[in-house]
Image (cartoon, rainbow, N blue to C red):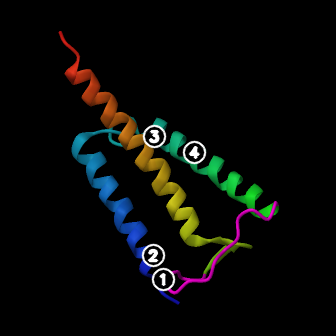
Amino acid sequence: MSLLYLALLLASLGCMVVLDRRFTLFFWSEPRRAALVLALGTLFFVLWDIAGIALGIFLRGQNEISTGLLLGPHFPVEELVFLVFLCYLSMVLFRGTQRLLTARRPA
């Protein structure tokens, strides 16, 4: 059992929190709305994964960098952390891009 992949995911998530805090992009801009968007986005992808697992499309591969802890059949704990990271990253990128484009718009 290894914690490498989970640790890397958590470190990446931490970096996104630092960026979000520094530039007030997502959670530090509107915390309630951000929590709702993050929860709904993560839920969507979890349901997507569950459907893929049920259809036999998604399977858990054995590797040496994962914990081996499963939340369900073929659904490792790292997958949930990755989905949270993916949704958070998407929203930080969206808000950051939106801010950059607004700043570049001629007055």
Judging depth in this view, the residue of 15 and 32 nearest the camera is: 15
Q: Amino acid at mark 4?
A: Gly
Between marks 1 and 4, how big is the CA–CA gap?
Answer: 26 Å
Between marks 3 and 2, how big is the CA–CA gap?
Answer: 26 Å
Between marks 3 and 4, how big is the CA–CA gap?
Answer: 10 Å
Label 1 belongs to which residue?
65
Q: Residue at x 32, y 33 (%)?
A: 97
Contact, mark 3 vs mark 4 (Cβ under 8 Å) = no
State the mark number for residue 41.
4
Q: How many marks?
A: 4
21 sits left or right of 59 in the view: left
Task: Give the mark nearest the N terminus, 1 or 3.
Answer: 3
Label 2 belongs to which residue?
5
Residue 105 quadrant = top left
State the mark number for residue 34.
3
Judging depth in this view, the residue of 32 and 21 nearest the camera is: 21
Which tag is nearer the camera, tag 1 or tag 4? 1
Q: Residue furthest bottom?
A: 1
